[in-house]
Structures are given as C-alpha cells and as structure tokens.
Amino acid sequence: MAKHESAWKQMFHFYRDEYREQHAPMLYGDVWLQTKSRQRLVLGLTDDAKNTLTAVTGLTLPTVNQHLDTGATLLTVSDAAGEHPFTTPFAGTVQKINADLLATPAILTRNSQKDNWLIVFKAD
C-alpha cells in the first residue's frame, strides 16, 4: 500500500520545488546567471567551463562601478594552457566582486558552481 502524505506536506514539497525551479541559475555559454531582484544579477562560472581549466594561476575581474557592454570580457583566467576570456551576456554595472577568488584564484577549480560567483551586476 502506498504511503500518503498530508495535504500540508504535499503543499510544502510543491512550493519548495517550484521555488527551486524559479530561482535556478540560467546558463549563457560558460556563464551562469541568477536573478536577485528586478535588475540585480549574480554572474558566475559554470561547472563545464571550470572543468576545462587546469591549475589556475591568476584571474582578472572588472572593478566595482565599471560598466560592461554585452559581449565584453567579464573574466580572464590564466592557467597552464594560457589565458581564457569569458564574456558577459548582458550590459550593466558591476556592484560587487568576489574578493575571495581574486585573493586565491586556485579555488576557482575546487569550488562548487554556486560558490563560483564572480560579480553582482546591475543590468541596464
């Protein structure tokens, strides 16, 4: 006989799954994007892009309050194979950068995708 959940438990599971689906990051090539508010976005590096990198020796991020156009370089990663530029899918202004990645670039390959956020961005 199948176990039946209470109506409250079913509703909880439905809304939890619905929330996860609505707030899941969107992928744009090698960059993931998650909406924080209407125009505030978090951009990060996807696991697929991270897996193509070898031992990361350095990275370059834009500065706070810098305006980026669509297709501009968001991140440049240096590793044993050379430099790898990653571009932004939208235009906007950088509000915050991930200082932990700048301080220790090697953690980029060890972090999970959600921890590989690069910048907080206010879209135009």
Image (cartoon, helix red, strand yellow):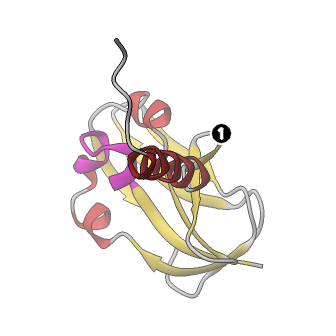
Q: Where the N terminus falls, by quadrant?
A: top left
Which image quarter is the C terminus in? bottom right
Q: Residue at x 65, y 39 (%)?
A: 29
Q: Residue at x 45, y 62 (%)?
A: 118
- Residue 10 percent location from the top left of the image: 45, 43
Res. 61 visible in picture: no
Q: Tell whether 77 sits left or right of 58.
A: right
Q: Residue at the bottom extreme? A: 65
Nearest the viewer among 104 and 32 is 32
Most extreme residue toward the front is 1
- Residue 48 pos. (x, y %): 48, 30
Q: Is residue 69 visible?
A: yes
Q: Main secondary structure of the magenta part?
A: helix
Crowd around label 1: few <14 · some 14–19 · many ≥20 (10 Å): some
Tell me where residue 66 sits by quadrant. bottom right
Residue segment shown in magenta: 107-116
Queried whether the magenta region covers residue 13, the answer comes back as no
Residue 111 covered by magenta stretch: yes
For residue 45, side relative to residue 103 (left or right): right
* In the rendered image, the vertical position of residue 5 relative to residue 16, given as above or below: above
Residue with the most extreme top position: 1
Q: Inspect the image, locate mark 1, and give the three-letter code of the amino acid beneath it.
A: Gly
State the residue in front, 22 or 72.
Answer: 22
From this view, report whether residue 113 is shown above or below residue 47. below
State the residue at coordinates (52%, 46%): 14
Residue bearing the label numbered 1: 29
